[in-house]
Image (cartoon, rainbow, N blue to C red):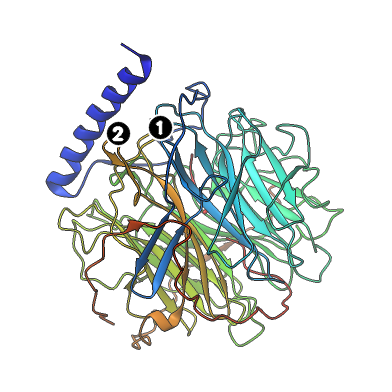
Amino acid sequence: MKYSTVVSIASACCLALLLAVANSSGQAHTWNPHSNKPLEKYDNPPAYIYRLDTSPRMISPHGVFVGYQVNVDANGNNIVGDAANECTISVDPTNSNRMAIGWRQFNSVQSNFRQGGYGYTTDGGFHWTFPGVLQNNVFRSDPVTNSDETGTFFYLSLLQTFCENMYRSTNGGQSWTELQADGLAGGGDKQWFTIDKTNGSGHGFQYQSWDTTTCSGSGQFSRSTDGGVTWQATIIVPNSADLGTLDVDTNGNLFIGGEGGFNNQFYCIRSSNAQIGNQTPTFDQVTTVNMGGVLTGGGINPAGLDGQLFLAVDRSGGPTNNNIYMLASVQPPGRSTTDVMFVRSTDDGLTFSAPHKVNDDPVNPSKWHWFGTFSVAPNGRLDAVWYDTRNAANNTDSQLFYSFSTDAGVTWSPNVAASNLFNPFEGYPNQSKIGDYITIVSDNTGGNVAFSATFNFNPNLGQHEEDVYYVRVFPSGGSTPTPTPTATATATSTATATATATATSTVTPPATPTPTATSTPRPTPTPRSEPTQRPRPTPAPRPA
């Protein structure tokens, strides 16, 4: 019997078991991501592709929203038998038609070997080109992309050594240059990074943080003062906070959001001097934040996270300028499923509001709201997206949902579905998850989303496959927010001057997506204005 046949049978058995458990109750066992961390490890060799089948690329409309497949071959067709997940998107702030997405590329679902996949578009997301991977047959994972204010893209990628590389693209993600020898960007598992796009002393500095599984053996934070080429010695993050993101306010202050590595408590951590190149960064404010629950893994995403923490700063220049926002899919007390929860700070991270539930469906312990993420538009609007099972009879089939806020998160618009339903348990690349995060980057008229879904059907395996999709979300797709009481500030901050240098919208039943050949006329794009020049766009999630 061929090895591929054995693997296929084993995979099918595992899938059947997972589906039986999940579909029986809509719930499965969750685990603490700090005590049970699936590491990024080399456990399968590169997959040998015996044949490469194709089918028309998937275009999946749902109401006014249209999802376009990103991981396509040179002819724009779907690649049958591969898998792609865990995607991050970057948008050129000088030309909104130019975008790039990075993802984990599995050349075959019969191997867990992944590489750094990437795709780009020059026409606003209607057509995507997938030139290949960052390095052929080199294990890479945890892709994180970002753009500076000039439209230069960056791609941070993790090796199996838990060391990293930063790549740069000056042509909209069409090609990438490795900025240092393999692994010399430091780092660790579940890494994230941001760029200082202010006009201050830290302009162009890059900051990254990661979890407690590190490349160097110590420290969870590093800084680059030369555009990601060289990285300074690692620094300890207070409370070992991880599984979150970073951002910079208009004054150049750096903020790290994360959950404590050993206490399941969320934190917002500030460094006021990271922007000073000749000083070792220190953390001068540590604020405890109540997110209304804790991060989890497992359940609807058996081998991965159900969500991570996202932190973003408002740099609109208006009344909400320098507000700090945090959003995460968390498991509330007494629950085994997750909700999308949001908090904000209006005083430079000193205190935060009480947690606000963004998903507006009634509390149902069988429903999941997972992979929550958000971004801040240049005009201060907040856009949030997540996977949601509210419309699934089996409590696990998921849809991308969208909501926005125009009042700094005090109220949120009625939630609307932005994709068709898909089965998140199919298409596993010999690894039982659909990645660990999705991402969104907003402009003044809407948001650009990179997400994974299983719309394509693989006839060889008799199941759907994981692919990467792009969709444009926008406020005109939903109603105006209904005012709700403002949450009161409850969180308290611990000042640590010590340096640590060592609306119920009607849901239309989803139409079944059908593969559409590239020659089929595309829906007319929703008009969106070119983003005005701004000091810097908003960065953006994670694990394995």
User: Where is residue 336 shown, x and y percent of the image?
Assistant: 24, 50
The residue drawn where x is 50% and y is 28% is 113
Given the image, on which type of amino acid does mark 1 rest? Val
Q: Is 405 positioned to the left or the right of 129 in the image?
A: left
Q: Nearer the viewer, residue 413 or 134?
A: 134
Q: Disc count in the image?
A: 2
Quadrant housing residue 484: bottom left
Task: Name which of mark 1 and mark 2 comes first in the sequence.
Answer: 1
Identify the residue at horizontal 51%, vertical 57% (top origin).
267
Q: Which residue is mark 1?
A: 109
- The percent coordinates of residue 251 (x first, y second) are 73, 72
Seen from the viewer's position, the closer of residues 228 and 237 is 228
CB-based contact (under 8 Å), mark 1 and mark 2: yes
Q: Residue 461 got which mark?
A: 2
Determine whether 191 is above or below 283 in the image.
above
Cα gap from disc 1 to disc 2, whole angstroms:
10 Å
Q: Which mark is residue 476?
A: none
User: From the viewer's perspective, is 228 left or right of 307?
Assistant: right
Name which residue lies at 40% across and 27% down.
110
- 229, above or below 514, in the image: above
Residue 125, by quadrant, is bottom right
Residue 420 vertical position relative to residue 294 in the rendered view, above or below = below
Q: Secondary structure at mark 1?
A: loop
Q: Tag 2: Cα neighbours inside 10 Å, few (<14), some, or many (≥20)? A: some
Q: Of all residues shown, which one is farthest toward the front?
A: 519
Q: Secondary structure at mark 2?
A: loop
- Disc 2 residue type? Leu
From the top left corner, tell me how far across and down residue 343 is, in percent: 45, 70
